[in-house]
Amino acid sequence: MSSSDAEQSSALDQLHLRDSWPWLAAAAVFLVFCWLLAPILTPFVLGAGLAYAGDPLVDRLERWGLSRTAGVSMVFLLIALLGLLAVVMLVPTLYGQLQVLLENIPQWLAWLQDRGLTHLGIALPEGMRLDAEGLRKVVAEHWTQAGGVLKEVWRHVSASGGALLVAVANLLLVPVVTFYLLRDWDHLVAWIRGMIPPRVVPGVDAMARETDEVLGAFIRGQLTVMASLTIYYWIALWLAGLNLALLVGLIVGLISFVPYLGAIVGVLTAVIAMLVQTQELLPFVWLAVAFGIGQVLESNVLTPWLVGDRIGLHPVAVIFAVMAGGQLFGFVGVMLALPVAAVLAVLFRHAKRQWLASRLYGQGAPVPAAQPGPANAGPPADAP
């Protein structure tokens, strides 16, 4: 490179830096602004996620001749009907199983007092019983301390009343935000694309397409895995004799997106529920068989077949992403951690390719030595 070319390149870099730093500062201010407003961003983040998930279906309805607003309304009606059907089918069963759980608590306390604590070598104080009369007697004898505890609990409940109202309001805002974002989704995407500098549009389009493919396949596969595990554990635990099979199956299925957490919580919940229900040994053997088959089915069939390596993250990275999402944005962060991690994985792969092709990475790299030819090799064929 000549000296004039080097000077021109340096001047161009300085021009780019001078033009870019106000926009970089604005982006940093925007990120800080979003972080400060995190408590009220929940309905908007959820609405955007639901709008993204529902956009392909609305686009298909548009291709069939419906208007955008009519397609969005039909999707909302379908979701409402499915939700109502789920409530009608599941709530009575869950109510009955929770009622069985409450009815069996006295029996479980009696078993814990007569057999469980004895096996553990723990003796209750003289005259104390783990039944309704014994608990009433303990509360009567320690009423002053119990009253202080109740006052403290009530103070915390009252203080969190405002937060509960905010959470309910955010939940009610989600369908409203989702409707308007879904109706104008294509215009929003076009607006964002129009704000991207033209020189980087091809690269951004490539990343956006890859992100959309990865994210869509991952979400569809993960939801299918969750539904399949819910149905499997419901049926398997019901065959094992567990009265709370549906409740435990729902718990395992809903949190199965975190590796191993669904199985751990499911085993603990099922064991406690079976202890409340019976103290015989054979049902626990069937529980172990059900969860063993479930883990093999999830690890070797469902996840490789439906999800595979689409997200491209190590299991430890998945656990970290879920914990980081919960720390930053609470329950919503936990729900959105893996989709966001899938997007970041795509960006990281593109950044890695750019880094490996950069001059900074290759600067000063040793030049491969030329391979020596045969000792008796003559001059090249095109040599004079």
Image (cartoon, grey):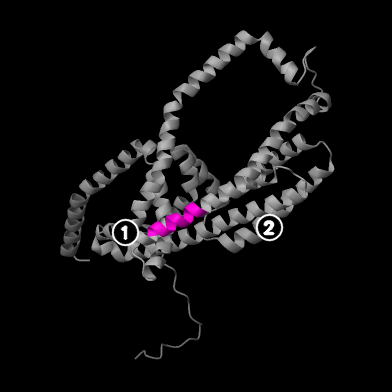
Please state if 149 lies on the left or on the right of 384 as rendered: right
Query: 33 and 383: which one is in front?
Result: 33
Q: Give percent across and percent down for residue 101.
A: 70, 35
Query: 279 and 26: which one is in front?
Result: 279
Q: Give percent across and percent down for residue 75.
A: 43, 58
Q: Is residue 304 visible?
A: yes
Query: Is residue 76 part of the magenta span, yes or no?
Result: yes
The quadrant in which residue 232 appears is bottom right
Q: Is residue 352 visible?
A: no
Residue position marked by numbered label 1 in the rendering: 189
Q: Is residue 256 above or below residue 311?
A: above
Give the secondary structure at mark 1.
Answer: helix
The quadrant in which residue 2 appears is bottom left
Residue position marked by numbered label 2 in the rendering: 297
Q: Quadrant of the C terminus?
A: bottom left
Give the secondary structure at mark 2.
Answer: helix
Write the residue at 33% across / 52% down: 180
The magenta stretch is: 72-81
Write the residue at 17% across / 62% down: 3
In space, the residues marked 2 and 1 are separated at their CA atoms by 39 Å
Q: In terms of secondary structure, what is the magenta stretch mainly? A: helix
Q: Earlier in the sequence, mark 2 or mark 1?
A: 1
Q: Give percent across and percent down for residue 25.
A: 25, 44
Write the residue at 46% across / 43% down: 333
Q: How many marks?
A: 2
